[in-house]
Image (cartoon, rainbow, N blue to C red):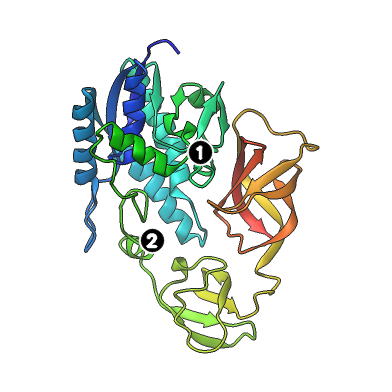
Amino acid sequence: MSSKKIFVGMSGGVDSSLAAALLKQQGHHVTGVYMKNWTEDLPGMECPWKDDYQDAKRVAAQLGIKFEVFDFQKEYKQKVVNYMIDEYKAGRTPNPDVMCNQEVKFKLFLDTALANGADMIATGHYARAKDGQLFTANDAQKDQTYFLYRVSSEALGKTLFPIGEIASKAEVRRLARSMGISTAAKKDSQGICFVGKVGIKDFLSQFVSVEPGDIVDQDDKKIGEHDGAIFYTIGQRHGLDVGGGLPYYVVRKDMEANTVYVTTDISDKELWSEKVYLEDMHWISSAPAPSLSLKVRLRYRGPLIDCSLQEGAVISLQDEQRAISPGQSAVFYQGLQCLGGGIVSRAE
């Protein structure tokens, strides 16, 4: 590839730091960009953005590249945070990382970078892009195509994923150390993508008024109380605080009645599904032919499951799967290529 002007999204972590370093090493004109998406401290929760910003700025100085800040807080709150809160209010289990990639990193960031003279953008995602198509990373354990399936082919055609070719996270850190990058040993971020080390329950509690309600078992008997149905997801086992005996699993929620239904029967038919109905479909290129042999992933790092796609938005799974929750993403693959996917509306 001839030398290009590339804006790299630098989050302050080792992956995006190394992505910028590798592109500079290849002779490109690199500008590091810190996306200021969320800076709000919540009670008892300090947003880590200042530390991340300083780490990104420090690496850019080490590399001798330009460094800018793009302030996307208003759009991020509207497109990602409000979406997540509304989905949880509706009793669903959303994935804010998917929406962040669709609306912010590969739309807003891309458009802003191009408007500022960039030829392409790059990020530290574990994925590969070629000719506007999306492929899994060489490191299957870290592959992030599940979160990228809603990115457009046009955006992928202007995006580089330098980390996607590297065999492992250990090798990423080794390369970063060998190049003297200050974030080489920085731990991966945990918790909600934009707040840091915060559980979803603590975060939602700041925005949603919740009331305790009943936990009801498979015999329609009240066995305890929960502190808000919004906090529970299908298949959840831990955090129910229902003591003694066999473990309980959440099988469904009634948001209007604020009731959580559970079972001790891991074989309960409400927990298992072989047909999944999707909405809000997105194909990176075009919808696959009905005869095409596909695999689907129903959660990040979940198994790839043989399936057939019927009527464009109904999945028939070869094997029953447990705890498929509305709001989650179903992402389709053929070999190493990620084709696209949709949002689960229901499963049966």
| Residue under numbered circle 1 | 148
Is there a contact, CB below 8 Å, between mark 1 and mark 2? no
Which element type, helix, strand or loop, lies under badge 1?
Answer: loop
Q: Residues within 10 Å of mark 1 (few under 14, many from 20)?
A: many
The residue that appears at 60% across and 52% down in the rendered structure is 298
The residue that appears at 41% across and 78% down in the rendered structure is 212
Residue type (three-letter) at the residue carrying disc 2: Ile
Q: Quadrant of residue 49?
A: top left
The answer to whether residue 112 is seen in the rendering is: no
| Residue under numbered circle 2 | 200
**Comparing marks 1 and 2, which lies closer to the viewer?**
1
Tell me residue 159's x, y (percent). Answer: 45, 25
**Direction right: furthest residue:** 291
The residue that appears at 34% across and 15% down in the rendered structure is 27
Which element type, helix, strand or loop, lies under badge 2?
Answer: helix
Q: CA distance from mark 1 to mark 2?
A: 21 Å
Tell me residue 108's x, y (percent). Answer: 38, 30
* Quadrant where the image shows the N terminus: top left
Compared with 89, 260 (above or below) is below
Q: Residues within 10 Å of mark 2 (few under 14, many from 20)?
A: few
Tell me residue 180's x, y (percent). Answer: 24, 34
The residue that appears at 65% across and 75% down in the rendered structure is 266
Residue type (three-letter) at the residue carrying disc 1: Leu
